[in-house]
């Protein structure tokens, strides 16, 4: 936007220190020049300024997603969908159509059975109330291998994951009734005669089967990832998101996709990427020396510009047993490195506690900010702080689930910044979590009001389930489980507080609170026009707000009228 642009007669929700609401905003050179009344803005603008009448619409600063997995959204369009299928016959008809268009012997791979984004109620939602088997699929594809992918488990937060292969696919991957299960969480279903049915059941949230036994079914290519990321940015813009923080860590193949798009010009969504380590590739390396070499580019705010920046280290503590964070499962998933599937991060990013502690201390000495998503890190961060102070380094604890008063006090004293996962811990599994911990501990569930009282900056986040930041905003305000029941109602926050957590606190998360997150003179002109007023709309309609127009650096990157 080279010329001055003024937006008049709106409701500009600035999210400045006093949460001021204005009528108009003046933009020049990608930044905010002024906010104020329409008369003030018109008087201060040049005569040739482009004028847009907002017709009373609300305008918010661009939303900042504190845990986005933005690349994942566009990947959902790589494989054909089975959405809307309500019987095995429906599924077979879809696959038959794909077979007709395929070459002989070509793989047929589809998205999971069920309806996105969460794939609830399967197979109960099918007329037969069972999964199709290899023999069902063979009816329409006797010569082409077929694989129906499992869901990415965090889309639904309910197990098991289910994937299905036909006979040709099993044969192509060398699987038969004698194939052993790779881990306790993976079950290869068999008929009474001991033959594989083609149905794989996994009691883990990240598929092992897809990355091991069925890896020959295909993988996302570099071209897939670039195109998907471009689609993802449009979808995030459509919901008012203009910046993301990828705190779970980014693998090299995803970073390459970002770099490819950045080489073409400004990104439609600004991104701060955290490094996902693949510890198995540097096994035996001296941790102190390794972190010292990484610190040259990973330290401080990292490297990059206002559109794309990479810095910080994702950290994870391995758990014992045979679960989703166990070394056994993660080693299996990581066997296909550098490919990472849906994850987009390396599965071998975890370390045993004492090894991880040494890495954290080395990171602190080299000014590398550490970012983790499990509450067991609080005590470890505290131990590190006794050796090397981290109080002012804004280390991150993300995906907050359950936090005690003691946890919150420790986090405050350590100067931690936090991100939420309300899509899971309030909406999808709030009541289930309360039942597991007991009613006496209910207020520990995503305790946003307690964190606000403690003065801990909290950035809302989607985890890509779904992409709209207005879902977490609604969760923070309404505190309702998907059943409609209230979850830890005392932890409700105001709409203003929730909006600040989706904007300015997100900017604080990436050390950018002076350049974005609110609509104030001198800040980046990242904003969007809301489909409804977030301050006055009926509470349950908060989650349905979308963007009518989105601007990044003063340039329109999305318009709903174009759809």
Image (spheres, helix red, strand yellow):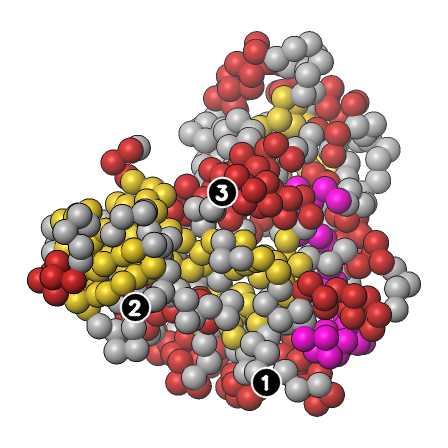
Q: Residue at x 56, y 76 (%)?
A: 394
The reply to whether the magenta stretch includes residue 541 is: no
**Helix, strand or loop under label 3:** loop
Pointer 1 residue: 391
Say whether disc 1 or disc 3 marks the residue closer to the N-terminus.
3
Is mark 1 in CB contact (under 8 Å) with mark 3? no
Q: Which label sits on residue 107? A: none
Query: Picture coordinates of residue 190 (x, y %)?
Result: 74, 33
Query: Picture coordinates of residue 161 (x, y %)?
Result: 61, 44
Q: Residue at x 48, y 62 (%)?
A: 66
Say few, some or many: other residues with alpha carbon within 10 Å of mark 2 (under 14 / 14 to 19 / 20 or more).
Answer: many
The stretch in magenta equals 338-367
305 vs 153: above or below:
below
Disc 2 to disc 1, how far (Cα)? 28 Å
**Helix, strand or loop under label 2:** loop
Pointer 2 residue: 520
**Helix, strand or loop under label 1:** loop
191 vs 4: above or below:
above
Q: Nearer the viewer, residue 74 or 552?
A: 552
Q: Which label sits on residue 265? A: 3
Query: Is residue 424 in view?
Result: no
Q: Residue at x 40, y 53 (%)?
A: 242
Say whether disc 2 or disc 1 marks the residue closer to the N-terminus.
1
């Amino acid at each position: 936007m080279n010329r001055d642009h003024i937006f008049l007669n709106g409701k500009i929700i600035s999210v400045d220190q006093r949460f001021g609401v204005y009528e108009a905003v003046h933009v020049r050179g990608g930044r905010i020049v002024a906010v104020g009344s329409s008369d003030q803005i018109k008087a201060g603008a040049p005569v040739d300024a482009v004028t847009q009448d907002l017709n009373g619409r609300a305008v918010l600063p661009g939303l900042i997603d504190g845990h986005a997995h933005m690349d994942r959204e566009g990947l959902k369009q790589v494989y054909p969908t089975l959405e809307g299928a309500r019987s095995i016959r429906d599924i077979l008809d879809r696959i038959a159509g794909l077979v007709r268009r395929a070459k002989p012997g070509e793989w047929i791979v589809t998205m999971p059975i069920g309806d996105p984004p969460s794939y609830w109620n399967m197979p109960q939602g099918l007329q037969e109330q069972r999964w199709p088997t290899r023999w069902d699929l063979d009816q329409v594809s006797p010569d082409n291998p077929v694989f129906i992918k499992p869901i990415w488990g965090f889309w639904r937060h309910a197990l098991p994951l289910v994937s299905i292969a036909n006979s040709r696919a099993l044969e192509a991957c060398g699987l038969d009734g004698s194939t052993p299960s790779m881990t306790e969480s993976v079950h290869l279903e068999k008929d009474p005669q001991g033959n594989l049915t083609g149905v794989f059941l996994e009691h883990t949230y990240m598929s092992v089967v897809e990355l091991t036994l069925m890896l020959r079914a295909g993988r996302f290519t570099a071209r897939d990832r670039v195109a998907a990321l471009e689609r993802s940015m449009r979808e995030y813009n459509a919901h008012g998101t203009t910046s993301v923080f990828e705190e779970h860590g980014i693998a090299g193949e995803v970073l390459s996709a970002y770099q490819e798009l950045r080489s073409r010009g400004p990104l439609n969504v600004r991104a701060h990427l955290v490094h996902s380590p693949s510890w198995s590739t540097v096994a035996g390396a001296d941790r102190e020396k390794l972190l010292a070499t990484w610190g040259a580019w990973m330290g401080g705010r990292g490297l990059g510009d206002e559109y794309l920046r990479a810095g910080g280290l994702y950290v994870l503590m391995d758990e014992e047993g045979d679960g989703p964070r166990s070394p056994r499962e993660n080693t299996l998933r990581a066997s296909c490195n550098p490919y990472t599937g849906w994850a987009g991060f390396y599965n071998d990013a975890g370390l045993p506690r004492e090894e991880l502690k040494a890495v954290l201390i080395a990171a602190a000495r080299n000014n590398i900010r550490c970012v983790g998503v499990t509450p067991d890190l609080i005590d470890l961060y505290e131990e590190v702080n006794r050796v090397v102070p981290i109080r002012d380094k804004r280390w991150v604890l993300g995906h907050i689930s359950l936090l005690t008063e003691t946890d919150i006090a420790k986090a405050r004293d350590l100067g931690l910044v936090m991100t939420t996962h309300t899509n899971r811990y309030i909406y999808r599994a709030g009541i289930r979590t309360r039942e597991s911990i007991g009613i006496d501990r209910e207020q520990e569930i995503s305790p946003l009001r307690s964190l606000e009282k403690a003065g801990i900056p909290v950035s809302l986040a989607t985890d890509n389930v779904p992409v709209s930041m207005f879902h977490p905003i609604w969760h923070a305000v309404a505190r309702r489980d998907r059943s409609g029941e209230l979850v830890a109602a005392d932890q409700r926050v105001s709409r203003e507080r929730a909006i600040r957590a989706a904007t300015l606190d997100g900017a604080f998360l990436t050390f950018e609170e002076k350049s974005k997150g609110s609509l104030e003179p001198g800040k980046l002109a990242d904003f969007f026009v809301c489909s409804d007023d977030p301050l006055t709309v009926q509470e349950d309609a908060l989650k349905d707000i979308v963007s009518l127009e989105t601007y990044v650096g003063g340039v329109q990157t999305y318009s709903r009228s174009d759809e």
